[in-house]
Amino acid sequence: MRKALIALAIAVMPGLVAHADEVVFKNGDRVTGTIKSTAGGKLTIDTKVAGVITVDLGDVQSFSTDTPVQLKLKDKTVMRDQIKSNQPAPLPPTSQPAEVVVGGKTVPIDQIKTLNAKRAWTGSIVANGMLARGNTHSTDFGLAADASLRRDDEVNDDRFSLSGAYNFGKQRDNNGVTTTSADNWFAQAKYDKFFSDKWYGYGVFRYDHDRIAFLNYRLAPGVGVGYQWFEQPDFNLSTEAGVSYVYEDYSSDGNQDRVALRLAYHIDKKINDDVKIFHNLEWLPAFDDPSDYNLNADAGIRANLTKTMFSELKVQYQRDSTPAPGAEKNDIRFLLGLGWAF
């Protein structure tokens, strides 16, 4: 009886052993774990030994998954099945075509656009502040947030983006008189519709308010086209050109409006797993008078403290070449904050 139970256990145990995804590299190396995603020419795999690692698809000879996944090719074909490697046995470095097998069909790796593409909102919230007492008596506070949703499947190939920020400050002089030194905020919504891997059309709407600059509000809706030069987990670069309508209402005197050209770009780059740099710029010169323009720009560095918390140092620059009467043309802010990423 005992021998029969042992034999049964030996027969059943192989079925209970957990399998794993596997990546085979062109130099013959292999790594096992759970393949998380593929996008922008990068493959991300969660390994037990080294944790989450990201590798170039160009270095991959083949890979396999233990369960069915969703795979999208560059020709927009979507496949849902288990991926099998076409390299089942250990191999020395090879120059054979890099391929996988999906549903019995051989697929070149360089034709894979995404695998398990995420459809969840991602973003961050950053708070900054300063409190001074003594010879200087001031209070400053700022809050910024952004969120985006990237969809890439057989139905949708688009991106939603939301962003906004609020800054407030006040100070008291030696005579006990308190004045407001900062009171401004903005909100922006943007939608990008991709027509190819690189080209997309966009619609954007931005609202600005700055009490100290005598700006009740500035409305800037616009449309145009963009080009996504790079869209990768560690590097993103896009440029845009279009047309915007700018309307400004001043608390000091009247209002003005204009039709403007809109030129913009975004870039972010991971220096390593914990540090990222970024830069954004938007220029809105009037068609009838290019010397009449608005410029919005920022640049900064973000360093991870934990998986979800980070610190951020950022500089913001805004220029209105024709500001409200009594207001300055330039505004610059240096912000050091603590943030939460989701």
Image (spheres, helix red, strand yellow):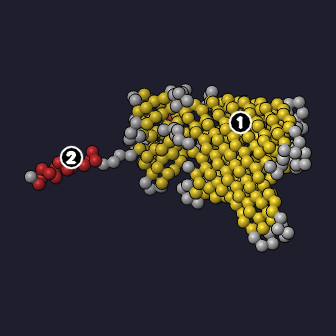
Secondary structure beneath label 1 = strand
Q: Is residue 238 above or below residue 144?
A: above
Q: Amino acid at mark 2?
A: Ala
Q: Residue furthest front?
A: 176
| Residue beneath disc 1 | 205
Q: Give 278 or 8, whichever is nearer the viewer.
A: 278
Residue 255 image point, x, y percent: 86, 37
Q: Please indicate whether residue 282 sits to the left or right of residue 85 in the image.
A: right
Q: Is residue 299 above or below residue 220?
A: below
Q: Give 229 or 124, whichever is nearer the viewer.
A: 124
Q: Residue furthest left?
A: 1
Label 1, residues with CA under 10 Å away: few <14, some 14-19, many ≥20: some
Q: How many marks?
A: 2
Q: Quadrant of residue 308?
A: bottom right
Q: Amino acid at mark 1?
A: Phe
Q: Is residue 323 above or below residue 304?
A: above
Residue 99 image point, x, y percent: 47, 34
Residue 29 appears in the rendering: no
Please name the residue shown 21% across and 50% down the image: 10
**Which callout, 1 or 2, points at the residue further toward the start of the chain?**
2
Residue 292 appears in the rendering: yes
Mark nearest the camera among 1 and 2 is 1
Label 2, residues with CA under 10 Å away: few <14, some 14-19, many ≥20: few
Q: Please indicate whether residue 307 sits to the left or right of residue 242 in the image.
A: left
Query: Which numbered dot is residue 156?
Result: none
Q: Give 124 or 12, whichever is nearer the viewer.
A: 124
Confirm or deny contact between disc 1 and disc 2 (CB under 8 A): no
Rounded to the nearest angstrom, the CA distance separating label 1 from label 2 is 64 Å
Residue 225 image point, x, y percent: 71, 30
| Residue beneath disc 2 | 11
